[in-house]
Amino acid sequence: MLINTAPDERSMSAAELGSYAFSKVKTWIGGYRDRPQEWTEPLNWYPVGVPDARDKVVVGGYGRHRCHVATGVDEVLSLHVLRQATLHIGKAGILTVDGLWADPLGLICGSGLSNEGTVEIAGTLGLRNTSSGGIENQGLISNRGRIIADATVTQVKSRWGRYLDLGTRQYLSV
């Protein structure tokens, strides 16, 4: 039995919807052996495992190594970059923050990008289905790649904070 269809046309069963209600927080700890900066290294995360579409992600706190997204990555529910932390999305990297199931009723404002550190974009950052404007930047966002956002993400420059834009920013209608 299907109970909902997400915007990218994937169907959700009742069991799948239930799993989104119990999202986990994945925290970047970095530093694992030969791959201390690599997003796709499961041992760079606590709890162990690469974040997926059901996870809220926190970069910083424990890890002194910057977090590097080198290749395409599936979406996450929300992304928070802490002070003194750096998230780098490489030229071939794709990171999408899709808050559809983080806060389906828009009550707790738990989706989108919250940045207190540095976000460097050389590849693609996607933002969609976010609450409360989708972005809160108190750090630095440096865009040399591409940001693709839907209509839930604010276009008001003051919400983007310190924002170096040498790439492109594209807004899609929902």
Image (cartoon, rainbow, N blue to C red):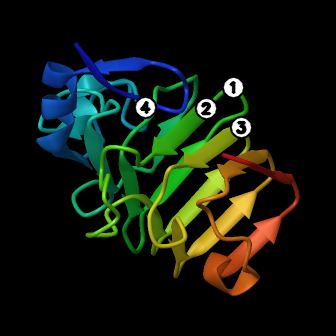
Q: Earlier in the sequence, mark 1 or mark 4?
A: 4
Where is residue 64 shown, x and y percent of the image?
33, 57
Q: Residue at x 28, y 54 (%)?
A: 63
Asked if marks 3 and 1 touch (Cβ < 8 Å), the reply is yes
Q: Earlier in the sequence, mark 3 or mark 4?
A: 4
Image quarter of residue 33: top left
Q: Earlier in the sequence, mark 3 or mark 1?
A: 1
State yes or no: discs 2 and 1 in contact (Cβ < 8 Å): yes
The relative height of residue 41 versus residue 141 in the rendered view (above or below) is above
In this picture, is 31 found above or below 50?
A: below
Instruction: Name the residue at 13% across, 21% down.
Output: 15
Q: Which residue is mark 3?
A: 123
Mark 2 residue crowding within 10 angstroms, few (<14) / some (14–19) / many (20+)? many
Amino acid bearing label 4? Glu
**Disc ID at residue 38:** 4
- Identify the mark at residue 149; answer none if there is no mark: none
Q: Point out the frontmost of discs 1 and 4.
A: 1
Q: CA distance from mark 2 to mark 3?
A: 6 Å
Crowdedness near tag 1: few (<14), some (14–19) or many (≥20) residues, C-alpha within 10 Å: some
Q: Earlier in the sequence, mark 2 or mark 3?
A: 2
Q: Secondary structure at mark 1?
A: loop
Residue placed most toward the observer, 111 or 103: 103
Identify the element where label 2 is drawn: strand
Residue 52 image position (x, y, % from top left): 32, 30
Other-residue count near label 4 (Cα within 10 Å), few / some / many at <14 / 14–19 / ≥20? many
